[in-house]
Amino acid sequence: MSQIDTILTLIAQKHLGIETLETRRSDRLDFHDTAVWCLKDALAAAFQAGVEHAKKTRNAKKSVPAKS
């Protein structure tokens, strides 16, 4: 599982009560009723995860010495 898949799965579990984001080919397992406030929280968490990733990437690039 890629890093982004892991992050998205954790967000789905925490904010949406969804066990996995894998397709299970079952309507009762693949479709979920979700309150809009839970969806909003999940989207905010995904956005924040992107912000944190961008900060880490930017800081990692700054710490690498420039090639001459």
Image (cartoon, rainbow, N blue to C red):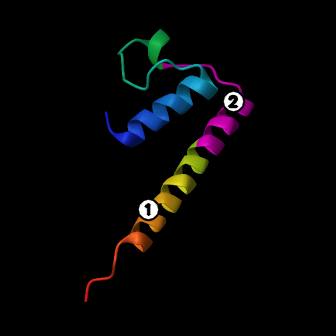
Q: Position of residue 19 (x, y in %)?
A: 49, 17
Instruction: Look at 41% across and 70% down and name the residue there.
Output: 63
Q: Decide: few, some or many residues near mark 1? Use Cα within 10 Å; few <14, some 14-19, many ≥20.
A: few
What kind of residue is marked 1?
Answer: Thr
Q: Position of residue 48 (x, y in %)?
A: 60, 49
Report how far apart the C-alphas of labels 2 and 1 lie in the structure.
Answer: 29 Å
Q: Position of residue 26 (x, y in %)?
A: 40, 11
Q: Decide: few, some or many residues near mark 2? Use Cα within 10 Å; few <14, some 14-19, many ≥20.
A: some
Drawn side of residue 17 relative to residue 7, left or right: right
Q: Which mark is residue 38?
A: 2
Position above or below: 3 against 18:
below
User: Element under label 1?
Assistant: helix
Which region is colored magenta? 31-45
Instruction: Look at 35% across and 72% down and name the residue there.
Output: 64
Which secondary structure class fits the magenta region best? helix
**Which numbered disc flags the more N-terminal residue, 2 or 1?**
2
Query: Based on the displayed image, in which of its 4 quarters is residue 27 positioned?
Result: top left
What kind of residue is marked 2?
Answer: Cys
What residue does disc 1 label? 57
- Residue closest to the far bottom: 68
Q: Position of residue 16 (x, y in %)?
A: 61, 25
Q: Quadrant of the C terminus?
A: bottom left
Instruction: Look at 26% across and 83% down and name the residue there.
Output: 67
Drawn side of residue 18 relative to residue 34, left or right: left
Pointers 2 and 1 in contact (C-beta within 8 Å): no
Q: Quadrant of the N terminus?
A: top left
Instruction: Look at 65% across and 24% down and name the residue there.
Output: 34
